Image (cartoon, rainbow, N blue to C red):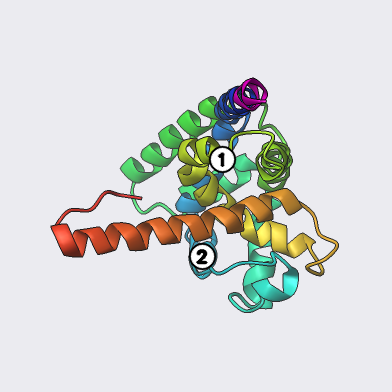
Amino acid sequence: MFEYGKNRRIKKQEKSVAIAEKYAEKITPSVSLIKYVIELDPELKHIVDKIPRNTVQTFASFELSEFIDKKDRMLFIGIVNQTFDEIIDAAVKCCSSSSEKKAVKADSKKAAAMYGGDLKNKTLAAIMIDTLNNLESISMSIASEAADPDRSYQILQRTFLSSVRNLIVLICNQNANSTDKLFPNITHVYNKWVIRRAKEYEREKSNYLKNGSIRAV
């Protein structure tokens, strides 16, 4: 019985490592590209920043309405339905100097190179959906505890939570209600990890107040 439990723990740990490798290979390039575009486009960034951290729970359309209005929602969807090149061209046109234009062009080439896939005629929304499908796949293993939940959290929580936050508008926009919704495993893991990270932060804060030291969570 002891040996069975030990082997099971080892298999879960190995699964966690496999998930981390899959994340690095298939997901990191696309979430990096998405993050780059959102930070580049002031309208996208403004909309994402309107959504408070640690508050989205149902990932349903009605919940999104608590943070952004219909105008912002349609603006977000309109922008992400453009191709990567169209978004970059628009950003270049908004630059006030030639050096700024060169910097945007150079950075966009780096982001595209890291992505590695064919971006021709591919919308940002399509990249986001591909990313969500990959995230849902690994989230299923984490939510079902086929992988070690603690090890998965330690390895992935920081990048997972920030990546999902950039995709919240798209997820909520596709979920008419909180019962029959898309990407249920992403939302399950996100909510669980947000709570865990918040508790860790409060513990770190308490330690800081007592001992004068704090570790970034």
Quadrant in the picture for residue 182? bottom right
**What's the residue at 46%, 39% (across, down)?**
154
Where does label 1 land, which residue? 31
Quadrant, the N terminus? top right
Residue 153 percent coordinates (x, y): 51, 42
- What amino acid type is highlighted by mark number 1? Val
Q: Specify whether residue 143 is painted magenta.
A: no
Where does label 2 land, which residue? 54
Q: Is most of the magenta stretch helix, strand or loop? A: helix
Quadrant in the picture for residue 121? top right
Q: Left of 212 or right of it: where is 152?
A: right
Q: Quick one: label 1, few (<14), some, or many (20+) residues within 10 Å?
A: many
Q: Quick one: label 2, few (<14), some, or many (20+) residues within 10 Å?
A: some
Q: Specify whether residue 7 is painted magenta.
A: yes
Q: Left of 195 or right of it: where is 9?
A: right
Image height check: is 183 above or below 25? below
Residue 61 percent coordinates (x, y): 74, 70
Instruction: Report the mark closest to the observer, 1 or 2.
Output: 2
- What amino acid type is highlighted by mark number 2? Asn
* Between 197 and 105, the one nearer to me in the picture: 197
**What's the residue at 46%, 50% (across, down)?**
40
Residue extent of the magenta highlight? 1-8
Task: State the SS at label 2.
Answer: loop
**What's the residue at 42%, 41% (across, down)?**
104
Alpha carbons under labels 1 and 2: distance apart: 19 Å
* Between 200 and 102, the one nearer to me in the picture: 200
**What's the residue at 66%, 71% (across, down)?**
64
- CB atoms of marks 1 and 2 within 8 Å: no
